[in-house]
Image (cartoon, helix red, strand yellow):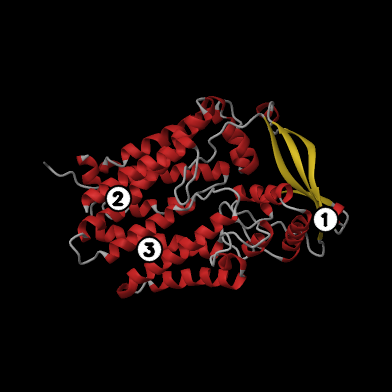
Amino acid sequence: MRTVLISITIIFFIFQVSLTIRNKHFWPFCAYSMFNRVPSTIMVRPKLKLYLSDNTTKIINIHETIPLEFFKAIGIYYTVYEDLGMKNRILFSDLIIKSMNDMKWGQMDEVYKLYNPPNNVKVVDFDLIEYKLDFTNFIDNGKPSVTEGKMVYSTRSQR
Amino acid sequence: MMYLQDFLFNQNNTEVRRKYFYFTLISIIGIMLLTGPYHSLVTDYVKILYPNGQVFGGSFLDIFLNKKNIYNILRFSSLVFIALSLIKKIRKWGLLFCLFTFHSFQYFHYKLTPYAWNFNTHLSFFLLVLCLSYFLEGTKYEKDFKSFTISFPIFYIGTLYFQAGISKLFHGGFDWITSGRTLLQFSYFLGTDFGRSVVALPYMAQIISFISVVVELLVIFFIFVPKTYRVLGILLVMFHVGIKLTMDISFWHLIVLFPALFVFGNPGFQYERR
């Protein structure tokens, strides 16, 4: 028994480290590669520009709309809006808007609180926009310079 | 090899520490099942992400992700099995069924998302060794496996930190430390106001990045030095409290296990004279 357990432990260590070096996950074995890259000084981050029923707009992070870990939210959005057809995009967009208007969930570690509009206000539409954030002078300015970039999708175009 | 053998099979006070470990682990799984990252909206996402409804290639497993009621039953049954494991006489069966339902649950979530980024699979491994240790009670393997139930999770934690450390050096390079940009830029996206103001201080991002990598690389060595366990456990919790204060990420499902493994119940192990 001891030999078996020692062997399992050693093989486990070698396998795990090999996953890390190859930067690959083999579920349920994990490379634990979180935050392991040095990002470019100019980063592109998708955000939602919400159009509310009181004729105002609000910009939120997309992970404020999905009840899963924040790092999965971006993947889900890009899969829907870049890989899937129009029918699925409309279904997903409607589901996201309905969630914000009718549901609630709180923050729990890597899951972020759902954005809900103020009382008697509804989310009507949204644009999925890639914002460009330039961190070149971040330390001096305390924040990156932000410019609105490519529009990936707009629910207004499906109406 | 002798060190490894002593570490694996000579853990102190295994009966009490296993009890602490058991209660902490089932609490984590219970809280996660109740609060997320699981949500019945997953079944709606599946229908959209997999238009033909075939996450599992059309096999019978697809039914679990396509039907909201089955998803909820699986989630609820994991909670029931956890609760049943509190009854000592049937603990092993409660853990076994929970292992099956919870691990399946985790697998469905992994299959749903486009990226295989699941950082909580350690819970399944820990549940497996815990479950086996109860099944092996009364056999000649009981003593060794009881120790292994404590030592394997500790080894897993040491390996996890080592992986996180080498991953930064392999894929980010020394620039990961010297630029401090990962910490700076992700603190902006995810972090707290306090975190953003701290990392924006001159050289602070580089200093914190350096300390993070050093800590991550060293944990695996300290798990073989039993006298350091309490200090190690407390330092690691503080390390994560620091990450929570700056990046707003706690990794809580791992760190709440540290008191049971490193701090309480005479932690450590004995070296045998040979």
On screen, residue A137 versus residue B226, left or right, reads right
> In this rendering, would B147 be left or right of A33?
left
Q: Residue at x 39, y 55 (%)?
A: B125
Residue B10 seen in render: no
Residue at mark 3: B23
Query: Camera-side residue: A134 or A156?
Result: A156
Note whether B103 is above or below B88 in the view shown.
above
Residue B116 % position (x, y): 54, 48
Q: Which residue is mark 2?
A: B151
Q: Amino acid at mark 2?
A: Ser
Whole-Å distance between the Cαs marked 2 and 3?
17 Å
Q: Is residue B205 visible?
A: yes
Q: Under tag 2, what secondary structure? A: helix
Q: Earlier in the sequence, mark 2 or mark 3?
A: 3
In space, the residues marked 2 and 1 are separated at their CA atoms by 53 Å
Residue for badge 1? A125
Q: Along the line of sight, which residue is nearer the eye, A87 or B194?
A: A87
- Which quadrant would residue B91 be assigned to in this image? bottom left
| Figure quadrant of residue B257 | bottom left
Amino acid at pointer 3: Phe
Q: Are marks 2 and 1 on the same chain?
A: no
Chain of residue at mark 2: B
Mark 2 near mark 1, Cβ–Cβ under 8 Å? no
Mark 3–mark 1 distance (CA, rounded to whole Å): 46 Å
Residue drawn where x is 36% and y is 42% of the image:
A13
Q: Is residue B10 above or below residue A34?
A: below
